[in-house]
Image (tube, rainbow, N blue to C red):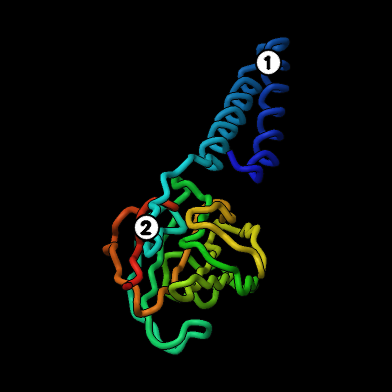
Amino acid sequence: MTKEGYKFLLPALVISLVLFAIWAGSAVLVILLLAVFFFLVSLFILFFFRDPERQVPQGKYSVVSSADGKVIAIKPFDGLDFIEGKGTLISVFMSVFNVHVNRAPLSGKVRFCDYNPGKFFPAFKDKASLENEQTRVGLESEHGQVILKQIAGVIARRIVCRIKPGDFVEKGQRFGMIQFGSRVDLFLPENVDIRVQLNQKVRAGETVIGVFRE
């Protein structure tokens, strides 16, 4: 479980236990129902903030997914800062049922990490990538530069990013999360061959998104 989940889990669990104790002395049905409700909330929080281990592919040219979820967009881009020339955008949508821990797509140095406040359009819409609240991270590896965006959605109102400019990250390393569902965009340079398809289910730190050409 991620450390961000404890501030949600502990209150719900304490309330549940207190209500069970009150019900034991009063036998009031409403109190029992409330106790069960908060206990179920506690179980959901445990499920949502789970943080399983992953087997990270070791090929030095591979780029892995930064998020669990479904690929909702694969499209070209041109003229983006930090990445010279053309490239491909891969967007992964995370539902509330996915693991929400984000992982580094490759090994490299963090060149910038910018937070931009914005709106909260549904994360699966195209305009969410431009207008929603987001954190933008630039990573530079020995093979090229990539840009990663953690994008908030309608429900997601908390972006966690634990890395900063100057840090070195390893491929598959945990670096943050987006709480309660959202989207991660990965901008890859044109010398990366894409290895995923639209609507494919991917896993952070495990699924190979693309491979740099040697």
Identity, as a three-letter code, of the amino acid under mark 2:
Gly
Q: Secondary structure at mark 1?
A: helix
Measured along the vertical axis of the image, is residue 181 above or below residue 150? above
**Disc 1 target residue:** 23
- Looking at the rendered image, the quarter that the C terminus falls into is bottom left
Q: Disc 1 to disc 2, how far (Cα)?
A: 57 Å
Q: In the figure, is residue 211 to the left or right of 2?
A: left
State the image coordinates of residue 195 (x, y, percent, origin top left): 28, 64
Q: In the figure, is residue 117 to the left or right of 51?
A: right
Residue at left 63%, top 23%? Answer: 30
Identity, as a three-letter code, of the amino acid under mark 1:
Trp
Closer to us: 208 or 123: 208
Residue at left 63%, top 57%? Answer: 160
Label ID, residue 59: 2
State the image coordinates of residue 147 (x, y, percent, origin top left): 50, 73
Q: Quadrant of residue 26?
A: top right
For disc 2, the neighbor class at 10 Å (few under 14, some 14 to 19, many from 20) is few
Label ID, residue 147: none
Q: In the figure, is residue 191 to the left or right of 154?
A: left
